């Protein structure tokens, strides 16, 4: 479905055709389109009439809602009814919850336990972080034969001792052992192994591979090395995290446990699926844009946001060229894809074809899905930094409410009108 605003007034008219990006369906396009319409119209003189048209290609050609859901593994629903915070989780879920939280912060479990414990006297100012007790724990880990075997098997030997010292010398851990926090040894084991994994990640520049069985065995061995009895259970740790405001909150942790995979995948598929669909069958989307442009012989400014910008560049590279007076890409990945040799229409290093229209590329350094164009194309394109002042992902959607963007588009319209 195509939506148009504005009156046709003949010789003084300029068309703006807007092509949305991934995951946009139905009325969602108005969150981009209407602010742009209102903002630009206020800046144009009465003598210049603009027809705004948008291609809602996502409704017809995008990934349909629910696509792919039947391929998602289902969880066992045979446990019967239950109630309370633990009802959402089985023990396997809870182990995943704990480790997912630790991946974001190896000390999160220890910190949550300290926060939940009855308050005691603060540590004295200027306390020695590496107290004798902490040093003994680190030495015990280094000397334990079972830890030695497991850490070699896991490939984490270069980092385990440093990780143990980092955890043991932290203020959070010092407060835990000072307050005789229950299961401090188990939390120390899990935190130490997670910190070692983080060090390995940093060393190799990518996630270090490990199975849950190896990870858990090593964490248990580290805990056993510093105490004769390991008392904690995954359920205890997870429920403690679920009750802590310093963690993700119960709903977020449950999602990590897999209970929310279906709605999460459904949302992601609408966006990522559109990208995959375009890269495999993009001709259908490009043809729909071309048909809208062909509906009128008036000068046209083609505005493409995100994947819409990629499709617009690909379309205009085709021969014969589509009659567009100016291309405006916004928060788009076209030049990034070309530079990694993944743009359908232009190989890496290939110049824009003769007859390609003037091109302005808008980016925001805070928008992680926006990229510059001038470093890839020395001629034929102009980069424009328009920052919304907000963080990603909000920055990716905020160009069209920005007055600076409205002024840029109005200037392009006036230039085309002349």
Image: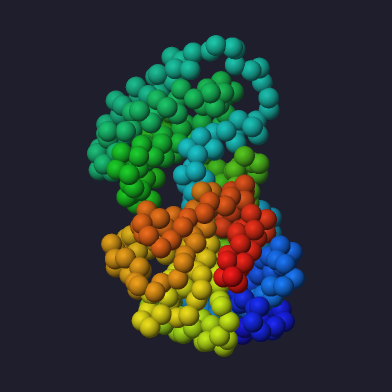
Percent x, y of residue 397: 60, 60
Q: Nearer the viewer, residue 305 or 208?
A: 305
Q: Position of residue 329 (x, y in %)?
A: 51, 65
The quarter in which the N terminus is drawn is bottom right
At x 54% / y 38%, what residue is drawn? 109
Towards the viewer: 285 or 185:
285
**Residue 259 in the image: x percent, y percent?**
56, 63
Task: Give the residue drawn at x 49%, y 60%.
Answer: 361
Vertical position of residue 302 compared to residue 335: above or below: below
Q: Is residue 220 visible?
A: no
Q: Name which quarter of the figure residue 13 lies in.
A: bottom right
Work out which quarter of the rendered image holds the C terminus and state it: bottom right
Residue 379 in view in this figure: yes
Structure colour scheme: rainbow
- Residue 235 rendering spot, x and y as whole percentages: 55, 48
Residue at image point 64% right, 58% down: 407
Along the line of sight, the residue nearer the viewer: 143 or 124: 124
- Asked if 334 appears above or below 207 in the picture, the reply is below
As drawn, the residue found furthest toward the front would be: 418
Q: At 69% from the left edge and 75% from the top edge, which residue is drawn?
A: 49
Q: How many marks?
A: 0
Most foreground residue, 317 or 161? 317
Q: Quadrant of residue 17?
A: bottom right
Tell me if residue 322 comes above or below residue 362 in the rendering.
below
């Amino acid at each position: 479905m195509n939506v148009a605003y504005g009156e046709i007034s003949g010789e003084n008219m300029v068309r703006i055709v807007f092509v949305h990006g991934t995951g946009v369906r139905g009325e969602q396009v108005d969150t981009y389109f209407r602010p742009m319409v209102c903002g630009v119209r206020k800046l144009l003189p009465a003598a210049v009439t603009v027809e705004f048209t948008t291609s809602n290609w996502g409704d017809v050609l995008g990934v349909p809602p629910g696509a792919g859901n039947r391929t998602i593994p289902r969880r066992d629903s045979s446990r019967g009814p239950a109630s309370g915070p633990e009802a959402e989780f089985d023990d396997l879920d809870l182990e995943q919850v704990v480790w997912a939280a630790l991946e974001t912060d190896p000390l999160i479990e220890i910190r949550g336990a300290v926060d939940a414990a009855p308050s005691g006297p603060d540590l004295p100012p200027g306390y020695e972080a590496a107290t004798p007790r902490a040093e003994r724990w680190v030495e015990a880990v280094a000397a334990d034969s079972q830890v030695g075997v497991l850490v070699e098997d896991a490939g984490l030997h270069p980092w385990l001792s440093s990780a143990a010292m980092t955890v043991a010398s932290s203020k959070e851990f010092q407060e835990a052992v000072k307050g005789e926090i229950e299961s401090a040894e188990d939390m120390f084991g899990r935190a130490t192994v997670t910190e070692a994994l983080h060090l390995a990640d940093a060393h190799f520049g990518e996630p270090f591979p490990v199975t849950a069985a190896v990870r858990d065995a090593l964490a248990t061995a580290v805990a056993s090395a510093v105490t004769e009895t390991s008392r904690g259970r995954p359920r205890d740790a997870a429920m403690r995290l679920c009750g802590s405001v310093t963690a993700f909150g119960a709903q977020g942790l449950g999602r990590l446990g897999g209970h929310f995979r279906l709605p999460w995948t459904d949302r992601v598929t609408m966006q990522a699926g559109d990208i995959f669909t375009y890269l495999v069958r993009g001709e259908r989307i490009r043809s729909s844009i071309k048909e809208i442009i062909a509906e009128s012989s008036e000068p046209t400014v083609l505005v493409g946001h995100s994947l819409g910008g990629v499709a617009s560049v690909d379309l205009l590279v085709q021969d014969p060229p589509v009659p567009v007076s100016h291309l405006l890409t916004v928060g788009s990945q076209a030049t990034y894809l070309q530079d990694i040799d993944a743009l359908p229409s232009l190989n890496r290093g290939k110049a824009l074809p003769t007859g390609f229209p003037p091109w302005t590329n808008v980016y925001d350094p805070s928008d992680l899905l926006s990229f510059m164009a001038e470093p890839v194309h020395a001629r034929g394109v102009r980069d424009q930094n328009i920052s919304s002042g907000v963080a990603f992902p909000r920055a990716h959607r905020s160009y069209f409410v920005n007055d600076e963007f409205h002024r840029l588009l109005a200037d392009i319209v006036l230039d085309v009108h002349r």
